Amino acid sequence: MAALQSLRQIVKSVKFSPRFERHAQHLKVISCDKGYIKCEMPVLEEHLNMKDGMHGGFTATLLDIVSTYAIATIPPARFGVSVNLNVSYIKAAQKGDNLTITSKVMKSGKTLAFANIEIKNQKDELIAFGQHTKFVANG
């Protein structure tokens, strides 16, 4: 429960950030546990590309942010920096879709953490999935 409250505070603070993370201001943490997180988010006009599908760069951003939050649920909480982010785009999300983004940490070691991520729409259709590797060493 403490991890969930901490992550909700972090996500809430993103809404007021002048930095890049503000693009995920509509993300809502639904549940989390050690090495796992589930979030929801609506697809809005600001997330669309010129073809009216969710922008691929925004899709990658969601994978990055949500997997980072999953990694941060493992004590000690470390956010680190990306080493590799692999994204597979399966289906375009549309304006009005309600997305569920889940991430599970596969391994978190002394210097590297590995997470898998999925984005699904309200029909439980896979939108995208990926793998994220982060350098998480302290100091």
Image (cartoon, rainbow, N blue to C red):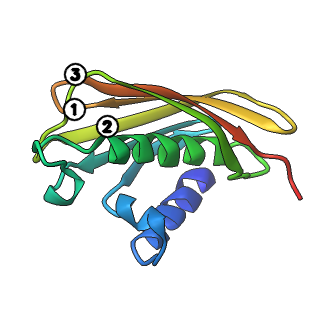
What residue would you read off at disc 2? 100
Residue type, numbered disc 1: Asn
Instruction: Name the spot of residue 44 as percent of width and height, x first.
Output: 17, 55
Percent of width and height locating residue 68: 58, 46
From the viewer's perspective, is residue 109 above or below residue 32? above
Badge 1 element: loop
Residue at screen point 15% across, 40% down: 53
Tell me which label, 1 or 2, sits earlier in the chain: 2
Counting residues from the start of the chain, the first of labels 2 and 3 encountered is 2
Q: Is residue 68 above or below residue 124?
A: below
Q: Is residue 27 found left or right of 121 in the rendered image?
A: right
- Asked whether the beta carbons under mark 1 and mark 2 sit within 8 Å of each other, the answer is yes
Count of numbered labels shown in the rendering: 3
Is residue 139 at all visible to an observer of this figure?
A: yes
Q: Residues within 10 Å of mark 2 (few under 14, many from 20)?
A: many
Q: Is residue 33 left or right of residue 83?
A: left
Q: CA distance from mark 2 to mark 3?
A: 10 Å
Q: Quadrant of residue 24?
A: bottom left
Q: CA distance from mark 1 to mark 3?
A: 5 Å
**Mark 2 residue type:** Thr
What residue sits right under mark 1 in the picture?
121
**Spatial separation of the CA atoms under disc 1 and disc 2:** 6 Å
Label 3 Cα neighbours within 10 Å, binned few <14 / some 14-19 / many ≥20: few
| Residue found at x 22% / y 25% | 91
Looking at the rendering, which quadrant does residue 127 occupy? top left
Cβ atoms at labels 1 and 3 below 8 Å apart: yes
- Left/right of residue 13 with respect to residue 98 in the rendered view: right
Question: In terms of depth relative to the viewer, which is nearer, 138 or 19?
Answer: 19
Residue for badge 3: 125
Q: Can residue 73 be seen from the camera position used here? A: no
Secondary element under disc 2, as helix, strand or loop, is strand
